[in-house]
Image: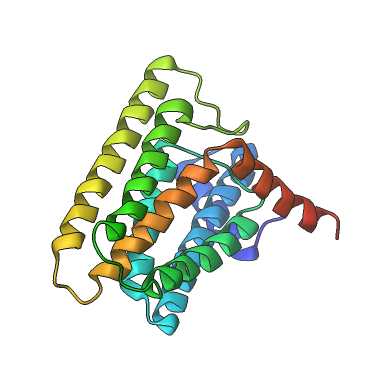
Amino acid sequence: MSYLPFSRRWAGYLAAAAGLPPGKEAVLAYAVEVLAINLINVLLALALGLLLGVLPGTAACLVAAALFRHTAGGAHSSSPWRCGAITVSVFPLMTLAAASLPPLKEPFDDILPAAALLAGFTAIIRLAPVDCPAAPVVSPFRRKKLKSLSLAVLTILAVILVLLRRSNWTAARQVRFGLVFSIFWVSFMLTGPGHRLISLIDGIKNKK
């Protein structure tokens, strides 16, 4: 497996400082590279959100998605670069779509958030946590804990959606429906079709 030059240098420095055996340096280099790529992807997504005029909603979507990823899991690309490309494109565009939604009268303005929460709770209760072969969750206790944390995250988001519904903040609607679309997205990533979509994206790249 090839690594970026900076990740190899940092891994070599950290391995030497910690007295790790040579075989661990490659693992450390991969970890450094993934962390660096994730940081770059977040900054690029925020920059795109700023460019599109939807920075608050993009930031909220990224935070919500990160919390779900660390608790509920979901489909993962085989490449951190492709995973990053999805992050950079999906969340700012979802927020832009949320900001473009026309105002709706009650109770229609609450139907979409309610549907997202229903989809989220259903996906978590039935499927979470969704692990991957590279990092399986084998402990029943840890699986139960992750499911409980996932439900707690979604419950907190439900409260935030209610507060944003009543808020006079100019970006409240953008953030509210950005979170709604994010809940739909992370719920979809827990399902079989979500995994097939990511596999399809990986397959397109691998055919080149």
- Would residue 8 be seen by someone viewing this image from the given angle? no
- Would residue 109 be seen by someone viewing this image from the given angle? yes
Q: How many marks?
A: 0
In the depicted structure, whether residue 197 falls above or below residue 91:
above
Q: In the rendering, at what x and y percent does residue 200 appear?
A: 73, 50
Q: In the rendering, at what x and y percent does residue 22 appear?
A: 63, 41
In the depicted structure, whether residue 205 falls above or below residue 70:
below
Quadrant containing the C terminus is bottom right
In the depicted structure, whether residue 152 falls above or below residue 177:
above
Q: In the rendering, at what x and y percent does residue 23 appear?
A: 65, 38
In this view, the residue farthest toward the top is 140
In the depicted structure, whether residue 152 falls above or below residue 50:
above
Residue at x 34% of width, y 68% of height: 57
From the viewer's side, name the closer residue of 153 and 34.
153
Residue at x 51% of width, y 32% of height: 130
Q: In the rendering, at what x and y percent does residue 180 appear?
A: 37, 55
25 relative position to 43: left or right: right
The image quadrant that residue 58 belongs to is: bottom left
